[in-house]
Image (cartoon, rainbow, N blue to C red):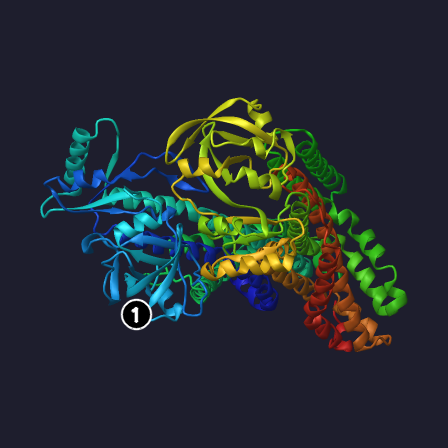
């Protein structure tokens, strides 16, 4: 049978190469994702190892808050702890470090613009040499309060020179410093694409509102003292001097391991997100593999029947098909792994071009990426060949005497029962999630959508033929005989047509869902700005994904003091522990909030909010049984548990579920920076005059951007569009595989219809008409997949938007223009996919085709 398998592969090499392409692309996506995330992980693990390379022990406050979006948060330490640590005999060197996550500083370049970076913008203190991961590249370290050092990448993009007086934006304002040096992080120009300004330690404490405090104290041991002994010595000294406060003392290895583990958890979502797209590509490929082997088996009916007639058992015929699929799977998976490694190299290079430099060595190719790629690709290929292989093993020897293929009977009743069960179950899950008032409704909606898709896939062969005839009814009138042939050929084998269309259905359904979800997001943003924003202008710290960059609250005070401005307030984002859960908390000036925001008063209003109170959403109030006047304990990272009174209940949750005053914020948070600033002009003031007055203030704050409501809406919509383009690019792989599947199916079906095509040519059909018939058949298959995909995408999009209505999704939008564009593009692409099969069909030798059995 080994010889039969080898000859079968050689004889059908073109067919199997086309099949292998689908496997290669799917495995490449999966392996490339694994290599890319492993490289990121190793890079940042080495980065943390570099940060704490000279640290033998560290002192920190106990963890107060930990969540997936804020990581581990701890309060600052009193500066007096540093003196205690330095007094320990086994300590050679100790220094206090600023909590990098709570720091902010941004250099202003020679052109008057803030120097941006791919990552965050930090402002930290310069540490002693042994404890400092930064090394001077040019110049010298900062020695006085008015001196700074910046990383080499920021320096290169700033246009300034060593010795220049430069402006730096910090949490306390905009100030002038003298640039005395540049620094490198190991062999890299920056800290993984971030921008870092290094001050003297006292100045770093001042600009980060941490005077007399440190986020962490690091220490190096004297020669001969182990990390564990140093840790124990420091812990004993702290216990003796600070009996009222329990501090944590950890070794350098321990804090490095913890930081690396937090990084792995943070990067997990990247692996999952890219893995989902890889799974979609592989699922699409599985349909193509199944279709290909089904056609190949049908075309080789006589060959396999002859094998049976010559004595081959059913098991041997089954083994032949399995053997062929195994060879194709192994070879295609191996190529896919190699392509995936190359893909990850391209992704790393792309990160470098946008400023997200990865320090350290080259690519990391884990063995799991190779093994998983080979195993998954091979298993999917072999599994997809199970049904065709069983069909091949059941071919009776008598079929060798027949000139036509033996048609297998489909189990229509069983298919109908399974399909209706999946479809009904999916619709029931959707209805329960949307209207049942259950928790985690989005999970039920997702399950329901998956079941609806499964039911549609099972039922598709039953209605593929009538559906194709319906959408193709005008084709014979428009294209004549080629149109009629295209319609009948697409409807002739509904199972094959449905399977081919399903590979496209998956990608289109996801594209449709993303398009609808994005359109609904933008519509909801517009609705929020219209209904809830009363401000005339919004100042942000720059665009991009995630929260806006920080803005010094000094700017908000200056805006509020303008004669043209009637009300203004900064808006701040932070986290605190409420009812044992990490929750987002917003800070705002209640007096201004009454004018610039309208969140729908349920009980009280922003005017009732004092420094001792909190505003909560109606959702959280109902969930916890709170009402105005109730006392709620909130645990802040900086100040611990604080009792606050519910003074305001509101309806809209655009900004989350909790608001406190700026006075309360300043008491309970270390990082006192604004993320947005709202400004409302006085009655009668012109918008142009107000804009001009505010823009004059922004000269000293070039990182801040001024927008009116319409401009801010356009900026937010542009961010959504940018994210959608990334998702489209990731889904493009699945759509390309699906189009390859259409081309594959058409190419293989040409072999089946060789005699038929020859007869058509013999009775006068031209080559151009043959090509037209094949192209239109491709268009019909694409339309079947596209229309079904759009229907499922529309259902899923509507369901998800409705399920998330409490999260701020107030509007549902379809974006018909974009969805129509998807159908048109796929129709055009399907014509391209049919070019080679159509050319082959038109070039069939008439006499040779007629003589084919």
Residue at 52% in and 51% down: 559
Left or right of residue 433, residue 126 in this image? left
The reply to whether residue 850 is visible in this rendering is no
Q: Which sits in the foreground, 120 or 435?
A: 120
**Residue 754, percent across and down?**
74, 69
Residue 62: x, y in percent? 31, 34
User: Label 1, on which residue?
Assistant: 162
State whether residue 840 is above or below residue 240: below
Quadrant of the drawing holding the C terminus: bottom right
Residue 776 appears in which quarter of the rendering?
Answer: bottom right
- Circle 1 — which element? loop
Q: Is residue 719 left or right of residue 151?
A: right
The residue shown at (70%, 38%) is 418
Q: Is residue 15 left or right of residue 554?
A: right
Q: Is residue 304 above or below residue 795?
A: below
* Vertical arrangement, residue 559 with respect to residue 607, above or below: below
Q: Where residue 661 appears, x then y in whole percent?
A: 50, 36
* Residue located 68% across and 29% down the image: 436
């Amino acid at each position: 049978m080994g010889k039969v398998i080898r000859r079968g592969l050689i004889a059908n090499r073109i067919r199997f190469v086309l099949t292998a392409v689908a496997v290669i692309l799917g495995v490449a996506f999966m392996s490339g994702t694994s290599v890319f995330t492993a490289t990121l992980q190793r890079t940042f693990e080495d980065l943390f190892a570099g940060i704490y390379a000279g640290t033998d022990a560290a002192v920190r406050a106990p963890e107060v808050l930990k969540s997936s979006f804020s990581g581990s948060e701890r309060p600052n330490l009193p500066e007096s702890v540093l003196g205690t640590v330095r007094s320990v005999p086994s300590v050679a060197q100790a220094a206090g470090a600023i909590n990098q996550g709570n720091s902010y500083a941004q250099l202003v370049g020679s052109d008057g613009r803030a120097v941006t970076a791919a990552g965050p913008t930090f402002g930290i203190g310069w540490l002693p040499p042994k404890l400092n991961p930064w090394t001077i590249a040019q110049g010298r370290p900062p020695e006085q309060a008015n001196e700074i050092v910046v990383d080499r990448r920021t320096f290169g993009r700033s246009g300034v020179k060593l010795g220049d007086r430069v402006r730096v934006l910090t949490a306390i304002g905009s100030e002038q410093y003298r640039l005395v040096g540049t620094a490198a992080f190991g062999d890299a120009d920056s800290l993984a694409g971030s921008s870092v300004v290094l001050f003297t330690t006292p100045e770093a404490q001042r600009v980060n509102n941490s005077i007399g405090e440190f986020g962490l104290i690091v220490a190096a041991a004297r020669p001969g003292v182990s990390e564990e002994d140093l840790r124990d010595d420091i812990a004993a000294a702290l216990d003796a001097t600070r009996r009222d406060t329990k501090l944590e003392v950890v070794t350098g290895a321990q804090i490095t391991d913890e930081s690396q583990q937090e990084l792995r958890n943070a990067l997990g979502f990247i692996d999952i997100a890219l893995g989902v797209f890889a799974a979609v590509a592989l699922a699409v490929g599985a349909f193509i593999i199944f279709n290909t082997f089904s056609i190949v088996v049908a075309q080789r009916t006589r060959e396999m029947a002859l094998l049976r007639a010559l004595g081959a058992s059913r098991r041997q015929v089954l083994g032949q098909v399995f053997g062929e699929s195994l060879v194709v799977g192994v070879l295609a998976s191996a190529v896919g792994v190699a392509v995936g490694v190359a893909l990850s190299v391209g992704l790393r290079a792309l990160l470098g071009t946008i400023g997200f430099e990865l320090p350290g060595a080259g690519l990391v190719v884990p063995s799991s990426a190779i093994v998983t790629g080979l195993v998954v690709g091979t298993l999917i290929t072999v599994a997809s060949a199970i049904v065709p292989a069983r069909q091949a093993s059941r071919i009776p020897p008598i079929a060798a005497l027949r000139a036509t293929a033996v048609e297998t009977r489909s189990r229509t009743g069983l298919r109908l029962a399974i399909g209706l069960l999946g479809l009904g179950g999916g619709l029931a899950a959707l209805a329960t999630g949307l209207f049942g008032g259950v928790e985690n409704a989005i999970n039920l909606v997702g399950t329901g959508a998956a079941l609806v898709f499964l039911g549609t896939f099972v039922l598709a062969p039953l209605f593929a033929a009538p559906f194709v005839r319906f959408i193709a009814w005008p084709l014979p009138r428009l294209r004549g005989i080629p149109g009629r042939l295209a319609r009948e050929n697409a409807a002739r084998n509904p199972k094959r047509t449905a399977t081919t269309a399903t590979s496209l259905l998956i990608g289109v359904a996801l594209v449709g869902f993303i398009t609808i979800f994005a359109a609904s997001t933008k519509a909801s943003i517009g609705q929020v700005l219209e209904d809830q924003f009363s401000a005339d202008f919004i100042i942000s710290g720059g665009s991009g994904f995630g929260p806006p960059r920080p803005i010094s609250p000094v700017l908000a005070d200056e805006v509020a003091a303008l004669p043209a401005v009637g009300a203004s307030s900064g808006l701040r984002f932070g986290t605190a522990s409420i009812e044992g859960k990490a929750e987002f908390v917003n800070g705002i000036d209640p007096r201004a909030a009454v004018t610039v925001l309208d969140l729908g008063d349920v009980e009280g209003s922003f005017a009732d909010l004092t420094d001792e109170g909190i505003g909560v959403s109606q959702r959280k109030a109902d969930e916890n049984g709170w009402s105005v006047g109730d006392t709620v304990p909130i645990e802040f990272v900086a100040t611990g548990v604080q009792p606050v009174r519910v003074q305001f209940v509101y309806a809209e949750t655009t900004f989350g579920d909790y608001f406190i005053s700026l006075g309360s914020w300043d008491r309970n948070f270390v990082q006192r920076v604004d993320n947005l600033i709202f400004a409302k002009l006085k009655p009668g003031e012109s918008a142009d005059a107000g804009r001009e007055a505010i823009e004059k203030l922004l000269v000293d704050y070039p990182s801040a951007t001024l927008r009116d409501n319409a401009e801010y809406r356009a900026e937010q919509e542009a961010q959504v569009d940018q994210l959608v383009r990334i998702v489209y690019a990731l889904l493009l792989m699945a759509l390309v595989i699906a189009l390859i599947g259409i081309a594959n199916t058409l190419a293989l079906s040409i072999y089946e219809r060789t005699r038929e095509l020859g007869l058509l040519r013999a009775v006068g059909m031209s080559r151009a008409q043959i090509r037209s018939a094949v192209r239109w058949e491709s268009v019909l298959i694409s339309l079947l997949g596209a229309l079904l995909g759009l229907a499922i995408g529309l259902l899923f999009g509507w369901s998800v938007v409705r399920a998330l209505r409490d999260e701020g999704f107030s509007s549902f939008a379809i974006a018909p223009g974009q969805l129509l564009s998807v159908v048109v593009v796929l129709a055009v692409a399907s014509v391209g996919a049919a070019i080679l099969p159509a050319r082959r069909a038109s070039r069939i030798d008439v006499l040779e085709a007629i003589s084919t059995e």
